[in-house]
Image: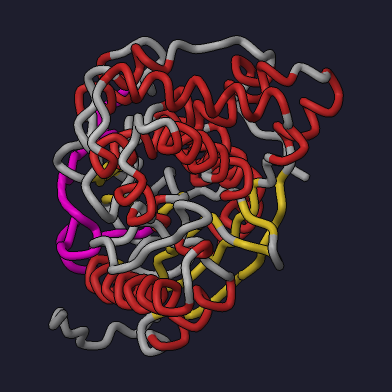
Amino acid sequence: MATPRGGEAQASGTKRNYDDVNKHKQPSLPGMKSGCDESSELQLEAFTHFWPWLEDALPGCVAIPPLARTHMITLADYGCSEGGNSRKQFRLIQEALRKGGALEAEHGAPALQLILNDLPTNNWARCVSNFVTGEGAPAAPDNYTVSLAPKSFYSALVAPAGTVHLGVAICAMIWLSSPPAGSAKDGICHLDGGEETRNNFKRQADADVDAFLRLRAVEFAPGGLLFIVVPSRMGSSSCTTALYAPIHDAASELAAKGEIDASLLEDLVMPSYIWEVEELEAAAMRASREWEVLQRGTASLTHLLDKFRADGDAAAYAHTVVGTFRGFGEPVVRNRLGLNDATTKRLFAHAEELVTASPGNYELRNVVSAVLLRRATARRSTSLDM
């Protein structure tokens, strides 16, 4: 299993004040993530695990026209959030391109453009700090530029047609473009709902991924690489066991005390989808005129669980588990349940208490699936009809 980079603070058990982190965040809009750098270790772990696929494919990519002859290499990050992980990913990609010779040319190095995409409600100031103005921002030579694309990647192009050479979407496609109808008595994930709820979510997820691939096919240059990683499931195992379950359990206990509306809780199903790798591959096959599948796979990553088993610090483990959910899911839960500040604080504090008391009930397995796609080298006309 690959070891994640950049996760030292959480790995050491250091506690972050997630109340301060989330105090000024905008409510999450359906379909995309509202996250913070401090709670994105699982996302980085997933990228790092599958990174060798992309690293191995880049030398072949740089040999395919027009990338081999271009004066501009364009990278796109679909669902960049605040940019902390994007910055780490960009540095790996930049170094791989350099080693592969893509950043060298007979008449001077080509320009390198990075497009950062997320919803307009994203924390763009933090993103700009990570890439341009803040401490640790990448060096900015004359041939390196950053562009922001504040829009949904399900409904709009984020780059001109035929210009993107490499794109990544790391855990961003967990979010659906709109919340399907559904309810669940035993959880807040679509997997906890009945057959109708699960089918509604699958239909929405299939429509969203089809729209995503259709739009990216327009943006990508022939031979360009698209790397998609999503939260997934392996049998009955998924990240929802640890991330979603303690929130539901804590909310249920508060509902029993009358602090949360029980009817609202039953109707709370996170507008997210836990994928199977076969579903991603099937989507690529539906778009086989535009995309070729180079790699596919699923992994169960247990870095945080293994650390807890080694040090036995249940409180630190609980803080990391619940804090990870808060980083992306708190705005949704708060808005859908109509919680005020005090009840929100009690909800997540109680969720931490539950995990601390019974960590074996909330084992965090970061199950993720990935596909590496290549844009067809002969571009065909692609319809944008949604």
Question: Which residue: 73% across, 21% down?
Answer: 314
Query: In the displayed image of the protein, which residue is found farthest to the front?
Result: 257
Residue 367 image point, x, y percent: 64, 53
Quarter of the picture holding the N terminus: top right
Residue 208 image point, x, y percent: 30, 70
Q: Relative to the observer, which residue lies in front, 127 or 237?
A: 237
Q: Looking at the image, is 316 positioned above or below residue 304? A: above
Type of secondary structure dominating the magenta stretch = loop
Quarter of the picture holding the C terminus: bottom left
Residue 343 image point, x, y percent: 34, 23
Residue 355, by quadrant, is top right
Relative side of 99 to 165, left or right: right
Q: Is residue 91 visible?
A: no
Q: Is residue 33 magenta?
A: no
Residue 139, by quadrant, is top left
Q: Looking at the image, is 220 positioned above or below residue 312? A: below
Residue 110 image point, x, y percent: 32, 45
Q: How is the image coloured?
A: secondary structure
Relative side of 158 to 265, left or right: left
Q: Is residue 152 magenta?
A: yes
Q: Is residue 261 visible?
A: yes
Question: Which residue: 27% across, 61% down?
Answer: 179
Q: Relative to the observer, which residue lies in front, 6 or 333?
A: 333
Question: Which residue: 57% across, 60% down?
Answer: 232
Q: Relative to the observer, which residue lies in front, 68 or 271?
A: 271
In the image, the segment drawn in magenta is: 140-167
